[in-house]
Amino acid sequence: MEAIQEAYAAGIRDFGENKVQELMEKAPQLPSDIRWHMIGHLQRNKVKYLVDTVHLIHGVDSMRLLREIEKQAAKVGRVLQVLLQVHIAEEDSKFGFDAEELQEALLSEELAACRHVKVCGLMGMATFTEDEAQVSREFEGLKRLFDRCKSLSLPEHVQLETLSMGMSGDYLLAQKAGSTMVRIGSAIFGARA
């Protein structure tokens, strides 16, 4: 908490948390103008705890999760900003839409009918590897997909402006590939205890 207060005092207003319980514990103890980002894998049964607090949900990895966010946001009369997570890594431990599923979701009547969700962009996590060429390929592939999706005839509340890719270990490669948002908490605050 002390480190967050220090970063806040330096002017930072966007903070990410990857555990719902920790976000819910921290938020009430910190300034109310912090924009909280839910950056971890989100289970549907935890959405209801976030809807009053979170500014942006990064990892919407399925239509089932999107439906739950729509439902819970409607209950509190909010429009929640989300990023759709695309599976770009060559490992099974990551979540997300593949390219075909993503396009289907973006063009679906179900998404068009959402009134309490604003899709702001895409998010992806590269393979956890030392192979920079592979990581760059994965980021570049997501950037191409992002650009392709932006050219689709999308609903008004789908405005693909944010491309969130890159974490503390690979954010420079992500920026080079076209990332507009990076998640660099451990580079700033150190590894989680």
Image (cartoon, rainbow, N blue to C red):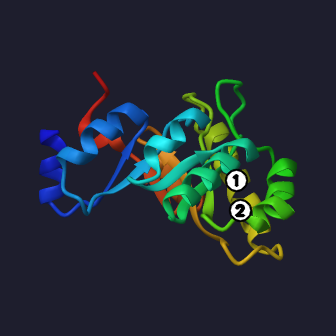
Amino acid type, label 2: Phe
Asked where in the image residue 185 lies, by quadrant, the reply is: top left
Q: Is residue 121 above or below residue 125?
A: below
Q: Is residue 182 above or below residue 131?
A: below
Q: Report which residue position mark 2 lands on.
A: 146
Is residue 186 visible in this depiction of the protein?
no
Tell me if mark 1 has few (under 14), some (14-19) or many (20+) residues whose alpha carbon lies within 10 angstroms of its own: many
Q: Which mark is residue 142?
A: 1
Residue lying furthest front in this view?
Answer: 75
Residue at 73 percent across and 52 percent down: it is 141
Q: Is residue 102 left or right of residue 44?
A: right
Q: Are marks 2 and 1 in contact (CB under 8 Å)?
A: yes
Point out the image quarter for the N terminus.
top left
Instruction: Pinpoint residue 10: horizontal percent, then vertical percent.
Output: 14, 60
Q: Secondary structure at mark 1?
A: helix
Residue at 27 percent across and 46 percent down: it is 27
Q: Is residue 104 left or right of residue 15?
A: right
Tell me if mark 2 has few (under 14), some (14-19) or many (20+) residues whose alpha carbon lies within 10 angstroms of its own: many
